[in-house]
């Protein structure tokens, strides 16, 4: 069993482009209405983990528009510094830069173009870890 982040966007097509540029995600599938508006899409992280996107319809407003956030996607990566630099070049808003934690992780958090929070973590080698 796997948990898959499913993130709603006002403009899924734009989100597909942005997530690719900012985080290196690759598009796997997209489904659109007759008018071309994307209502569901699937991407893969550089590590091959899925992330789903949805166009919510109705009176939905993104977290950036409301200032309210109810969820955050957490992604394990091999190089937090590289993800952070790439996200910055794509215009991500920095919530906090790469930081080491007492739990042996290097982490950072950024917000995307619609205000969704993305948390990235990298496991640091511990003294007892094999090389």
Image: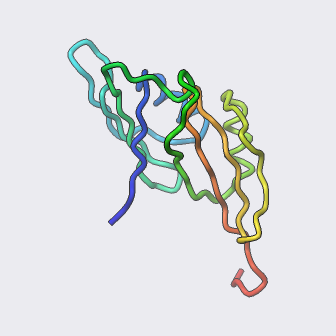
Residue closest to the eye, 93 or 49: 93
- How far across and how far down the image is residue 68, in percent? 55, 32
- Tell me which residue sits at (61%, 57%) in the image: 77
Task: Judge left or right: residue 118 versus residue 84.
Answer: left
Colour convention: rainbow
- Tell me which residue sits at (64%, 59%) in the image: 78
- How far across and how far down the image is residue 35, in percent? 25, 12
Task: Judge left or right: residue 112 versus residue 32.
Answer: right
- How far across and how far down the image is residue 19, in percent? 53, 35
Q: Taking 22 as reference, is 100 above or below it? A: below
Dividing the image into 4 quarters, which one contains the N terminus? bottom left
Q: Taking 7 as reference, is 106 above or below it? A: below
Residue closest to the eye, 123 or 62: 62
Task: Judge left or right: residue 126 versus residue 23.
Answer: right
Q: Which quadrant of the view contains residue 41?
A: top left
- How far across and how far down the image is residue 73, in percent? 52, 48
- Tell me which residue sits at (75%, 79%) in the image: 126
Q: Which quadrant of the view contains residue 67?
A: top right
Residue closest to the eye, 37 or 62: 62
Residue at the extreme bottom: 128
Q: Taking 89 as reference, is 127 above or below it? A: below
Q: Taking 53 as reference, is 38 above or below it? A: above
């Amino acid at each position: 069993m796997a948990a898959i982040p499913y993130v709603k966007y006002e403009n899924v097509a734009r989100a597909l482009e942005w997530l690719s540029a900012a985080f290196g995600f690759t598009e796997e599938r997209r489904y659109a209405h007759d008018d071309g508006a994307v209502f569901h899409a699937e991407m893969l992280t550089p590590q091959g983990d899925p992330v789903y996107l949805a166009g919510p319809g109705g009176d939905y407003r993104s977290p950036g528009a409301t200032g309210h956030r109810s969820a955050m996607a957490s992604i394990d990566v091999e190089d937090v510094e590289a993800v952070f630099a790439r996200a910055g070049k794509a215009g991500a808003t920095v919530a906090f830069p790469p930081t080491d934690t007492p739990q042996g992780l290097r982490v950072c958090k950024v917000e995307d173009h619609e205000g969704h929070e993305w948390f990235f973590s990298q496991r640091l080698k511990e003294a007892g870890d094999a090389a």
